């Protein structure tokens, strides 16, 4: 973005305008040199100027000029028609001052968000390192662009965020989210269009920190957190003082809406194709209601963008090595799987990619590729692609046997050897290893030790022990099914 004047003069003019009570012309942080706009749509573009100011927007690809007037708070919004993929283009905005946005491209835009697993960087170092980092960095594509939202929290929804666009290059891409970049790079190769990533990550933030206030309060599992939010707002003086001092505000770890207010609301209604979400670890002590949290999160963002079918793809947690907490991690993964109950959703399974402990390189390139398979199949008409391994669709009791039917069941097989990872329990809730055989496009499970099954589970506490796959070679998602007792 550049003011059409010498930088020192521009600063002087802006200072004088402020002193005289006239607000300088600005855009939201998202609108800057090097950005990618969603192609073939009408994308909002917005900013601030003097209240009542006429604002003119000229785009190099449009013959007509767009005009709008700022409201009483000085906010202006224009709706910019975009074209087929390509560029570079420019946008000139006039309203008291003149701004020019250069190196603007049309392509596909995705919001890639979550916690430490999404924040993980490509290059080795603190919070970074992927198994194929050198290959990805060397092949960095300048038509993949990332807008990284600066970490922030707020008690109330903010109008803007801090952040900047970066062009992928061997010098810059090492600091990109490894999952998001691998996802974008595959879309770039397959679609041959520019790809924009909005990277919003905040390690340690609970799922409810990413939800809007209404959705927190309507989520019946989270009323205590709504009370905590009210208490925070009553004590906002201490919160605001800490932020002004550059210190971490005193907030409980379960504080809802804080990240949503500061890092998600300012992105809307920037035009998106969909959302890629990778998180879950911060809710370790809330494994039970996590299923409800994640589905509410997706609904919250769909409502914010006014897109009821906005694609929302999430990744299951990777394996954790045994220990007394294995059941809690299993419950979290099951909650993540239940996202599939929502339309236009998808689940990336990571059970076969090895444990994640924060000290060794991770295979995030493959995680990103699996996200891209979902996007290609669901959003870009690549119906011939199989985006997932088997996903449980139906379970039926057949006496002492359980029949399991799956979506994406074409070519069911064991990755090696006989099927493993299946367990069955009776009324005593004690699980026994079960024999599993493939019958057509279903799996039949039984255990000699359980004559009346009440529950069946697969790769549950130890997801790495499951070996069910399909012709795509992608792993089946872990699951647990409990049957109602006969009346």
Image (tube, rainbow, N blue to C red):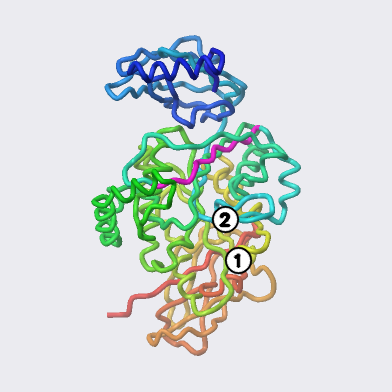
Q: Give how far apart the Cα atoms at labels 2 and 1 are.
A: 25 Å
> Which labelled disc corresponds to residue 403?
none
- Residue ranking furthest to the bottom: 449
The answer to whether residue 337 is seen in the rendering is no
Counting from the top left corner in percent of width and height, residue 76 is at 36, 22
Query: In what quadrant of the picture does the N terminus appear?
Result: top right
Q: Quick one: SS at disc 2?
A: loop
Badge 2 crowding class, 10 Å Cα cut-off, few under 14, some 14 to 19, many 20 or more, is many
Badge 1 crowding class, 10 Å Cα cut-off, few under 14, some 14 to 19, many 20 or more, is few
**Residue receiving disc 1:** 357
Foreground mark, 2 or 1, reads 1
Q: Nearer the viewer, residue 170 or 365?
A: 170
**Residue receiving disc 2:** 388
Q: Nearer the viewer, residue 307 or 130?
A: 130
Q: Residue at x 46, y 32 (%)?
A: 271
The magenta span reads 143-153
Could you tell whether 133 is left or right of 227 in the image? right
Q: Can you say whether 367 is above or below 19 in the image? A: below
Is residue 147 shown in magenta? yes
Q: Can you say whether 388 is above or below 486 in the image? A: above
The quadrant holding residue 26 is top left
2 or 1: tag closer to the N-terminus: 1
Is residue 190 shown in magenta? no
Q: Nearer the viewer, residue 69 or 249?
A: 249
Query: In what quadrant of the picture does the C terminus appear?
Result: bottom left
The answer to whether residue 469 is seen in the rendering is yes
Could you tell whether 477 is left or right of 187 in the image? left
Counting from the top left corner in percent of width and height, residue 24 is at 41, 19
């Amino acid at each position: 973005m550049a003011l059409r004047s010498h930088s020192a003069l521009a600063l002087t003019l802006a200072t004088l305008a402020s002193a005289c009570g006239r607000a300088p012309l600005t855009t939201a942080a998202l609108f800057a040199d090097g950005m990618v706009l969603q192609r073939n749509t009408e994308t909002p573009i917005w900013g601030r100027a003097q209240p009542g100011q006429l604002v003119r927007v000229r785009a190099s690809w449009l013959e007509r000029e767009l005009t709008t007037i700022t409201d009483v708070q000085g906010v202006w919004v224009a709706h910019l028609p975009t074209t087929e993929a390509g560029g570079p283009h420019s946008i000139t905005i006039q309203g008291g001052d003149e701004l020019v946005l250069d190196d603007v491209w049309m392509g596909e835009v995705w919001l890639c968000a979550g916690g430490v697993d999404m924040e993980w960087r490509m290059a080795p170092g603190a919070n970074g390192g992927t198994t194929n980092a050198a290959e990805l960095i060397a092949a960095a594509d300048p038509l993949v662009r990332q807008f990284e939202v600066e970490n922030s929290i707020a008690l109330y929804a903010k109008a803007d965020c801090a952040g900047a666009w970066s062009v992928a290059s061997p010098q810059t891409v090492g600091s990109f989210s490894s999952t998001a970049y691998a996802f974008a790079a595959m879309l770039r190769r397959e679609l041959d269009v520019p790809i924009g990533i909005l990277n919003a990550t905040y390690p340690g933030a609970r799922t409810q920190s990413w939800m809007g206030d209404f959705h927190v309060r309507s989520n019946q599992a989270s009323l205590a957190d709504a009370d905590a939010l009210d208490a925070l707002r009553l004590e906002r003086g201490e919160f605001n003082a800490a932020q002004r001092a550059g210190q971490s505000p005193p907030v409980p770890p379960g504080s809802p809406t804080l990240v949503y207010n500061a890092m998600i609301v300012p992105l809307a209604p920037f035009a998106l194709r969909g959302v890629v979400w990778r998180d879950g670890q911060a809710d370790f002590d809330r494994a039970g209601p996590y299923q409800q949290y994640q589905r509410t999160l997706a609904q919250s963002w769909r409502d914010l963008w006014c897109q009821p079918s906005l694609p929302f793809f999430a990744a299951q947690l990777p394996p954790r090595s045994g220990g007394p907490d294995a059941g809690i991690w299993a419950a979290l993964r099951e909650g993540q799987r239940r996202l599939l109950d929502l339309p236009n959703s998808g689940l990336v399974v990571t059970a076969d990619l090895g444990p994640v402990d924060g000290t060794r390189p991770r295979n995030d390139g493959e995680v990103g590729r699996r996200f891209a398979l979902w996007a290609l199949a669901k959003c870009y008409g690549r119906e011939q692609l199989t985006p997932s391994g088997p996903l449980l669709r139906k379970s039926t009791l057949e006496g002492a046997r359980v029949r399991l039917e799956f979506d994406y069941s074409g070519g069911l097989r064991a990755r090696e050897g006989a099927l493993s990872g299946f367990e069955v329990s009776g009324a005593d809730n004690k699980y026994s290893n079960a024999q599993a055989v493939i019958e057509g496009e279903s799996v039949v499970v039984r255990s000699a030790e359980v004559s009346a099954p009440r529950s069946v589970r697969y790769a549950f506490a130890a997801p790495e022990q499951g070996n069910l796959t399909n012709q795509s070679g992608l792993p089946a998602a872990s699951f647990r099914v409990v049957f109602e007792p006969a009346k």
